[in-house]
Image (spheres, rainbow, N blue to C red):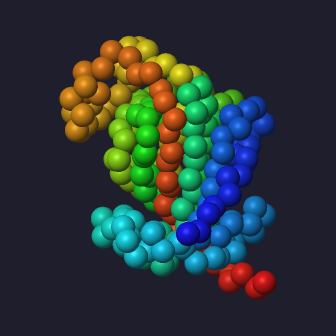
Amino acid sequence: MVRFAWRDGAKIEDGDEAHRRLQYWGGQVAEKTNVLVSEPLPQFLVEYPALVQRIAATGAFANSKHGKPNHCLVNEYEPGQGIMPHNDGSAYFPAVATLSLGSAILLDIFEYQDESTPTTPAFSILQEPRSLLITHGSAYQQYLHGIAARDLDTAEDLNKVINRDMLTNPELRTALHLQRDRRLSMTFRDVERVAPRLF
Ligand SMILES: O=C(O)CCC(=O)C(=O)O
Ligand SMILES: [Fe+2]
């Protein structure tokens, strides 16, 4: 059995005090050069249940350099933890496939503002457990995304959800509030520039 160490969540920006824990598989993206110092993906991502191939089969990465994700970042959110509004930067092909596990959570989508970090989402996506969210094209490039650092989403927060009709859990479809629990997200991306690990 292979064990993976949790790492402290990197700050996306000053003020992002979330201290999420994270793991990454497939290697580490060098901060300055955006090059992936690659490591083989673990078996369970490529053999069974072969998440990488199944995500590739959606077509989301058909035009990316490798035609499929070569990197997976896992974020852990305890109730009260979130991630500041951000974009995912230029290291990646502009598509991300996010598998949600554990608690349901709201991904808030923001329009860009000059300078300041936006606080009011344009809309939100309710990510239910075991769902796959694919963000690409203009949704990836022209908006910021974030998760509010709170342990309860109110009716007002839920009013901004645009995908209630798509949810499979009827309770979530009609929920008036959302009490958060621990959540894990697995975010799959294709890092276009790759260097093999030398040692
Ligand atoms: O946990 C999520 O759904 C979002 C994670 C995210 O935005 C990121 O890792 O860049
Ligand atoms: Fe992100």
Q: Which residue is drawn at 36% across and 51% down?
A: 132
In the figure, is residue 78 to the left or right of 177? right
Quadrant of the image for the N terminus? Answer: bottom right
Number of numbered markers: 0
Q: Where is residue 12 in the image (x, y as percent from the top left)?
A: 70, 44
Extreme-front residue of the structure: 1
Residue 138 can be seen, yes or no: no
Q: Nearer the viewer, residue 181 or 33?
A: 181
Q: Where is residue 155 in the image (x, y as percent from the top left)?
A: 38, 14
Name above or below for residue 77 compared with residue 97: above
In the figure, is residue 51 to the left or right of 13? left
Quadrant of the image for the C terminus? Answer: bottom right
Residue 133 can be seen, yes or no: yes
Q: Position of residue 110 (x, y in %)?
A: 51, 34
In the figure, is residue 114 to the left or right of 33? left
Q: Which of 168 and 88 is in front in this view?
A: 168
Q: Which residue is drawn at 68% across and 57% down?
A: 5
Q: Residue at x 43, y 15 (%)?
A: 154
Q: Which residue is drawn at 38% across and 17% down?
A: 177
Q: Position of residue 51 (x, y in %)?
A: 39, 66
Picture quadrant where residue 89 is located? bottom right
Name above or below for residue 39 compared with residue 99: below
Name above or below for residue 154 compared with residue 114: above
Q: Nearer the viewer, residue 79 or 157?
A: 79
